[in-house]
Amino acid sequence: MSTKMERPLNPVPDEICISIRRDTDIVLACQKGRALAAEFNLSGNDQVVVVIAISEVARNILLYAGRGEIILTPVQQNHKQGIMVVARDNGPGMADIELVLQDGYSTGGGLGLGLSGAKRLMDEFEIMSKVGRGTTIIMKKWGSKLNV
């Protein structure tokens, strides 16, 4: 996993927050994620990758927590730009994150490729979870280099 990433204390002007409470919210989060990725010059393939990763983590919010949020933020670092996706809920949390990230592991009857797939697709991926308190996933996808 990547180095711990801290979320800014003050809201970022370009930050987009989508409450996840129903299936249509997942669609909205995916649409907004793709639009933001396009706005910050991620390739068409990388835009699709961002959409798939958002879909996976947002679906998990609905399945396991019932509600939560997806926060989309443009990011810049070392002359490159990209998108940060934060998925956050106050659900049951995960006792064994390493187990949850194994391909084929599922408690919901699926293929068990959602979180592990999102981790593979994104450039940076981190999970913080406490049983009984919820889960936060932070993912980043980097795109083009900035002209400096």
Image: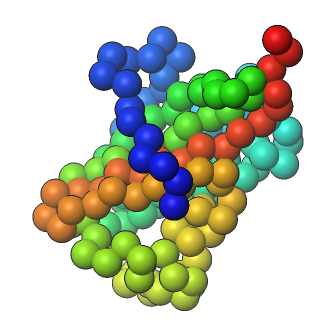
**Front residue (pair 31, 71):** 71
- Residue 100, image x and y in percent? 42, 77
Residue at the image point whose x is 40% and y is 58% from the top: 127
The colour scheme is rainbow
Pick whichever, 132 or 148, lies toward us: 148
The residue positioned 74% from the left and 28% from the top of the image is: 80
Image position of 124 with respect to 72: above or below = below
Query: In terms of image quadrants, where is residue 79?
Result: top right
Q: Residue at x 48, y 49 (%)?
A: 3
Q: Is residue 96 above or below residue 145?
A: below
Q: Is residue 50 visible?
A: yes
Residue visible at 58% across and 77% down in the picture:
113
Does residue 74 appear left or right of residue 99 in this picture? right
Vertical placement of residue 12 versus 101, above or below:
above
| Horizontal arrangement in the rendering, residue 10 relative to residue 138 (left or right) | left
Q: Is residue 45 left or right of residue 33?
A: right
Quadrant placement of the C terminus: top right
Residue nearer the viewer, 76 or 78: 78
Whole-percent x and y of residue 71? 45, 35
Res 109 quadrant in image: bottom left
| Residue 129 screen position, x and y as percent | 28, 60
State the count of labels: 0
Q: Where's residue 116, x and y in %?
A: 56, 71
Residue 67 makes an appearance in the image: no
